[in-house]
Image (cartoon, rainbow, N blue to C red):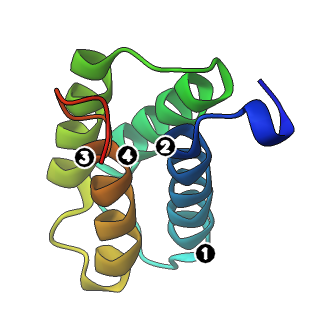
Amino acid sequence: MTGSDEDPRVARLRTAVARLRRELAAHPVEFTDRGIAEDELAALAAMAEGGTPEIPRLRRSLLLVAGAIGSVSALTSGLAGVRSAVEMFGEGGGR
């Protein structure tokens, strides 16, 4: 889907993931689970590019990202954006 055909939830997810990936790349401090966060953010980006993602996989990736970077205060805002975007894919099909 492109343009006006695109699901706004997918567009929001793509934007939030891109933002957090940029913030993580710019974060100067290495931490143990950084690789996990990078891998799962790449998976989230791929899901967003592929159209409507599988909700269980989305949630799993979010949990892994949150666990990996949840204690890094500099990334809190970006993580909240991704969490909010994933929550739009709730059981009701969005908000």
User: Which secondary structure lies at badge 1?
Assistant: helix
Q: Is residue 9 above or below residue 52?
A: below
Q: Badge 2 is on which residue?
A: 9
Residue 44: where, in percent of width, then height? Answer: 48, 33
Would you say the residues marked 3 and 4 are in contact, meaning their CB atoms lie under 8 Å apart? no
Q: Say what amino acid the circle numbered 4 marks.
A: Ala
Q: Badge 1 is on which residue?
A: 26
Q: Give the quadrant of residue 1.
A: top right
Q: Earlier in the sequence, mark 3 or mark 4?
A: 4
Residue located at (30% from left, 29% from top): 93
For label 4, the crowd category at 10 Å Cα-Cα, with few meaning under 14, some 14 to 19 and many 20 or more, is many
User: Which secondary structure lies at badge 2?
Assistant: helix
Dot in front, 1 or 2 = 2
Q: Is residue 55 above or below residue 73?
A: above
Would you say the residues marked 3 and 2 are in contact, meaning their CB atoms lie under 8 Å apart? no
Residue closer to the observer: 51 or 25 = 51
Q: Is residue 73 above or below residue 64?
A: below
Q: Earlier in the sequence, mark 4 or mark 1?
A: 1
User: Which secondary structure lies at badge 4?
Assistant: helix
Residue located at (60% from left, 25% from top): 46
Dot in front, 1 or 3 = 3
Mark 1 vs mark 2, CA separation in Å: 26 Å
Horizontal arrangement in the rendering, residue 31 relative to residue 28 (left or right) = left
Q: Earlier in the sequence, mark 1 or mark 3?
A: 1
Residue 7: where, in percent of width, then height? Answer: 59, 35
Dot in front, 3 or 4 = 3
Residue closer to the observer: 64 or 11 = 11
Residue located at (51% from left, 59% from top): 16
Q: Earlier in the sequence, mark 3 or mark 2?
A: 2
Q: Badge 3 is on which residue?
A: 87
